[in-house]
Image: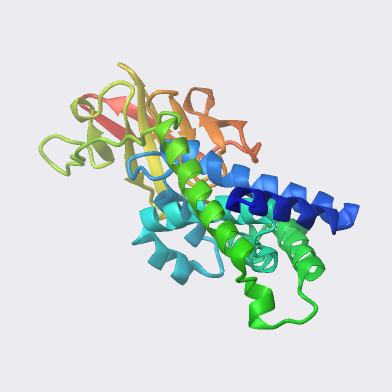
Amino acid sequence: MSSVQEFLQGVAKSWTHQSWSVRLLRLWLGITFTYAGIDKALDGGFLNPDATTYIGKQLAGFAQQSPISPLLNKMVEHATLVGAGTMVGEIAIGLATLFGVLPFLAAVAGAGLSASLWLSSTFYTTPYFLAPDTAYLIMWLVFALSVMPRKRTVSRVLNVDRRGAIGIGVVGALSIAFASLGNFFARPAKIAFSAAKVVTKQGGGAPTNAIVAISDLNVGSALQIKLTSGDPGILIRTATDAVCAFSAVCTHQGCTVDYDQASKELICPCHGARFDPLQNGKAIAGPTRAALTEIPVQISGEYIVSS
């Protein structure tokens, strides 16, 4: 019998020996986590530091309101590596669950990843049942209990027989292959845009409330600014004679939004909320319906000023 036949027979056997309730849970978790990893691979901005959906910006946004913010701030320093590991890890967990390769360890890893996502991005979601990460944490724990070996020895848990070794190789190879293919066919990145220089001048004819010289902010471009409250803001020149500004704090979970020059929208990298600056910061997509806080600005002579 070939190694491939042996592996496939083992996969089929792992399904037939489970109840329908466990099969349904296993199918859902396996498909969902595999899709989650592939979806990240298909996002051309996930590993691109200049993109609005860059993992580093997501981690920095999560850190603003997470109970594990010190850990997340450390992860920001290695964001690309963390993003690649998360992407491949999710695919590997999903495939291992579907193929029955080290199922108990895969379930524990899935629970751990769900717990970290809960602590990072949805810990303060209220009511708690609106946070999907908590539901996935419980589902993974239930699945782990259902596939836990009766004799919890190292050899039983690791399942290091011939089929287990083949399975690990298959899952590893497919995870890397899916991630690589996803990156190859990735959607174009949405690039975060900010002006190259800020020339807020006090003197030389500039008013005291000047933010930037109008000549330094092209039409269709944006500039990150700091509000008097200390919060991040964003200034956009929408036309030759029109500007607008908003708090860059997303009204969903407090992450910092970026301006996407292609779509002319403000996009939250954490949960995908989208806001239209031409409609006074109105939420047009994503998990929030509250508009961004608009900051009064206007053009005065050669400068954009707070009004």
Spot occupied by residue 37 in the image (x, y as percentages of width and height): 55, 46
Spot occupied by residue 79 in the image (x, y as percentages of width and height): 38, 56
Q: From what the image shows, is residue 74 above or below residue 284?
A: below
Quarter that holds the C terminus: top left
Q: Nearer the viewer, residue 157 or 226?
A: 157
Is any atom of residue 43 visible in this view? no
Q: Is residue 103 left or right of residue 188?
A: right
Q: Nearer the viewer, residue 56 or 41?
A: 41
Q: Nearer the viewer, residue 283 or 295?
A: 283
Q: Is residue 108 left or right of residue 216?
A: right
User: Which residue shows up at 62% across the image and 36% down it?
Assistant: 286
Q: From what the image shows, is residue 307 above or below residue 56?
A: above
User: Which residue shows up at 10% across the image and 37% down it?
Assistant: 204
Q: Is residue 146 left or right of residue 73?
A: right
Q: Find residue 35 and report its image quarter.
A: top right
User: Which residue shows up at 67% across the image and 46% down it?
Assistant: 32
Q: Find residue 213 and report its image quarter.
A: top left
Spot occupied by residue 126 in the image (x, y as percentages of width and height): 73, 56
Is any atom of residue 42 visible in this view? yes
Spot occupied by residue 127 in the image (x, y as percentages of width and height): 77, 56
User: Which residue shows up at 71% across the image and 56% down it?
Assistant: 10
Q: From what the image shows, is residue 104 above or below residue 84?
A: below
Q: Find residue 291 and report its image quarter.
A: top right
